[in-house]
Amino acid sequence: MSSQSQPQTPGFNTRAVHAGQAWEESTGAVIPPLYLSTTYHPHRIGELRGGYDYSRGTNPTRDSLQEQLAALEGGRFGISYASGLGAEDAILRGLLTSGDHVVMGNDVYGGTFRLIDRIHGGAGIGHTPVDLGDVDAVRAAVRQNHAKMLWIETPSNPMMKIADIEALVAVAHEAGALAVVDNTFATPYLQQPLALGADLVVHSTTKYLGGHSDVVGGSVITDNQELADKVRFIQFAAGNQSSPFDAYLTTRGIKTLGVRMDRHVANAEAVADWLLGRSEVSHVLYPGLPDHPGHQIAARQMSGFGGMVSVRLKGGASAARTVAEATRVFTLAESLGGIESLMNYPSEMTHASVKGTELAVPEDLLRLSVGIEDAADLIGDLERAFGQL
């Protein structure tokens, strides 16, 4: 054994700040430049400078982000896209062909369902929704449909269900299927699907990774060279890559991800506890609560329970709408994961595309993206809104 100690892997926050972010040599700039150029001058024909020729295929700013993304998820390959759905589309187009089948959660994000059902369904890709909390049911669905892909979203949007990643990955691999994990809600700060055996991780970087509600993006991370090449080819050939400026903004947001997530989690726990004490509430859906059905699994595979809280109101749709439209610190809007708190009515907003299907969201449900404001102000805002009931 060598007497020299092995280099220690940097911690998460160190990687978030430094991965792909080396200072620029010609000037010493601590922050890498934003490369907006669409094209690059080679040394000579056939001899590129650093591998760069045209920014649809390669761009230094995007490369920096992709290295940063891979480092956070503990993978070797990060690929960034113009949106989260664009990243999902690249996985589906790059890895499946007509006649293949996807098994997914029966409460998957509405946009994901729409993409698989209405776009890829028309191209011959089949799908089966199933309760991911029932591992035996998932196994049966994968086997019966000879599924090529198991799509795992945990925590789920907006029902906050928890899926056992390790157990479901085993089910997928037993059947020769790929396991994809949407890690958007948890973020790599709280959950590491690749370490639990997942083949690919997908994010809407619009959410917590960007973190400031000012940039749309998506990413795929994997440790598998073959999968990375196929998914990256869609990025290049279909022109679905993130722009340099969007990549720069996402990188800038990622550097504070750990700090922000600590505050998101603390505030979400405070909001969930407050909601538990309200007579107007029938259910508080937050995996950090001991009576949440997935609490034990979440405690095992997550280092924190996240910043998302869903709540169901006894007064039904009318009560939910009243509260959603009465808050002032919580802003009524779609999306999530920004520094500001957002209030969403999924049935008519983010999940309107699944109304009338088995994935339909209860009309009495509100989804709260709990921001980094002072917890007392968030609770005071909810107190005033609940006072309208």
Image (cartoon, rainbow, N blue to C red):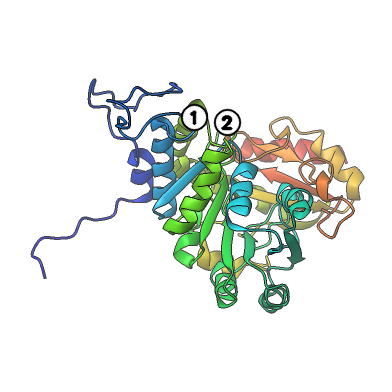
The reply to whether residue 289 is in sight is no
Kindly indicate the quadrant of the structure image that contains residue 84. Answer: top right
For numbered disc 2, what is the local secondary structure?
A: loop
Q: Give amino acid for label 2.
A: Val
Ranked by sequence position, the earlier of labels 2 and 1 is 2
Q: Residues within 10 Å of mark 1 (few under 14, many from 20)?
A: many
Task: Reply above or below: 203 against 326.
Answer: below
Total marks placed: 2
Q: Residue at x 34, y 42 (%)?
A: 19
The residue beneath circle 2 is: 215
Contact check, label 2 and label 1, Cβ < 8 Å: yes
Q: Position of residue 183 (x, y in %)?
A: 56, 53
- For this rendering, which residue is in front, 178 or 161? 178
- Residue 17 falls left or right of residue 340: left
Task: Give the residue drawn at x 65%, y 40%.
Answer: 336
Please report the residue visible at 47 percent of the width from the left and 28 percent of the height from the top: 244
Q: Amino acid at mark 1?
A: Leu
Q: Is residue 87 something one can see in this rendering?
A: yes
Image coordinates for residue 95, horizontal then vertical, percent: 58, 57
Q: Is residue 243 above or below residue 167?
A: above
- Residue at 47 percent of width and 42 percent of height: 257
Task: Kindly state the secondary structure of the residue where label 1 is placed.
Answer: helix
Q: Which residue is mark 1?
A: 249
- The answer to which quarter of the image holds residue 33 is top left
Q: CA distance from mark 2 to mark 1?
A: 7 Å
The numbered mark at residue 153 is: none
Quarter of the image with the N terminus in it: bottom left
